[in-house]
Image (cartoon, rainbow, N blue to C red):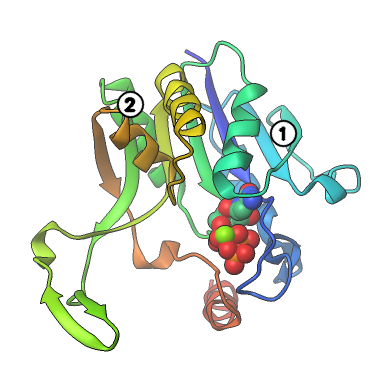
């Protein structure tokens, strides 16, 4: 069984103010955290690191697991699409945002395990802890049933062929989703969840970096 990991590091970091994948966290570039975690997992056969076109040549990170560098696209979905073109004959693909440096080995393994069990995909997620409401123009419209609400993260593992098909379909239809599972859901595939954590947060703004620094210096 061939398992390939796609590590996304081709964003522009508009909300952060700079390309956050390259900022240093305790001396190491942010994207290297996820790379290190993947390197500790024997089940991963190959890593595809997706980088901004202009950084492709200068970034050569250390990695035990065979690593291929691929140029990203305009949107996250384009970056994943590009990466998928460089994978042949994989059984499972696991996709991860390098903007989440604290994803655990267990999250990767459990996500992969669910696909091995027969699910088309498995996404890392946890039950919402706060009440979530729909607000339009400062007007509270509705309170959603928290029991059914999950905060969705990466890693997300998928059956490779089905994921590629879902991506081709989305491209044809001009559909953009904020994660890969949404493309799979739209194509009618069965997706499940594996346990996520509030500690697996995404570094999106400078505020998130404060939290990340607290965590790495406590560990
Ligand atoms: N990403 C990518 N290619 C893109 C856009 C995003 O590989 N064209 C990656 C980012 O590097 C990040 C992950 O997808 O690891 C999640 O995206 P996000 O947090 O939105 O990062 P950015 O797109 O860089 O940030 P922003 O949306 O604020 O510009
Ligand atoms: Mg983005």
Looking at the image, which residue is at 49% across and 64% down? 202
Q: Earlier in the sequence, mark 1 or mark 2?
A: 1
Badge 2 element:
helix
How many numbered tags mark residues here? 2
Neighbourhood count class around disc 1 (C-alpha, 10 Å): few under 14, some 14–19, many 20 upward: few
Residue 30 x/y as whole percent: 67, 61
Please name the residue that numbered disc 1 is placed on: 64
Looking at the image, which residue is at 68% across and 43% down? 73
Residue 55 x/y as whole percent: 85, 50
Q: Quadrant of residue 7?
A: top right
Q: Which mark is residue 162?
A: none
Looking at the image, which residue is at 40% across and 20% down? 162
Q: Which residue is at the front of the view, 205 or 106?
A: 205
Q: Which residue is at the front of the view, 50 or 1?
A: 50
Residue 75 x/y as whole percent: 60, 49
Image quarter where ligand 2 lies: bottom right
Image position of 29 (left or right of 131): right
Does the numbered disc 2 mark a residue whose Cβ is under 8 Å from ligand 1? Answer: no
Badge 1 element:
loop
Please name the residue that numbered disc 2 is placed on: 115
Image position of 207 (left or right of 23): left
Residue 71, placed above or below residue 115:
below
Residue 177, placed above or below residue 114:
below
Residue 88 x/y as whole percent: 61, 13
Neighbourhood count class around disc 2 (C-alpha, 10 Å): few under 14, some 14–19, many 20 upward: many
């Amino acid at each position: 069984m061939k398992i390939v990991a796609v590590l996304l590091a081709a964003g522009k970091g508009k909300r952060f103010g700079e390309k956050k994948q390259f900022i240093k966290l305790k001396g190491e570039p942010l994207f290297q955290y996820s790379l290190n975690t993947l390197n500790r997992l024997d089940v991963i056969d190959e890593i595809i690191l997706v980088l901004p076109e202009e950084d492709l040549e200068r970034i050569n990170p250390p990695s035990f697991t065979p690593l291929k560098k691929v140029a990203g696209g305009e949107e996250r979905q384009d970056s994943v699409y590009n990466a998928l073109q460089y994978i042949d004959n994989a059984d499972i693909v696991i996709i991860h945002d390098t903007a989440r440096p604290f994803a655990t080995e267990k999250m990767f393994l459990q996500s992969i395990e669910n696909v091995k069990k027969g699910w088309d995909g498995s996404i890392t997620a946890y039950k919402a802890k706060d009440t979530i409401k729909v607000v339009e123009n400062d007007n509270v419209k509705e309170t959603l049933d928290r029991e059914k609400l999950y905060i969705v993260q990466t890693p997300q593992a998928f059956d490779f062929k089905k994921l590629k098909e879902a991506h081709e379909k989305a491209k044809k239809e001009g559909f953009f989703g904020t994660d890969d599972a949404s493309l799979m859901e739209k194509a009618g595939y069965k997706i499940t969840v594996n346990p996520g954590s509030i500690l697996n947060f995404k570094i999106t703004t400078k505020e998130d970096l404060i939290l990340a620094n607290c965590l790495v210096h406590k560990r």
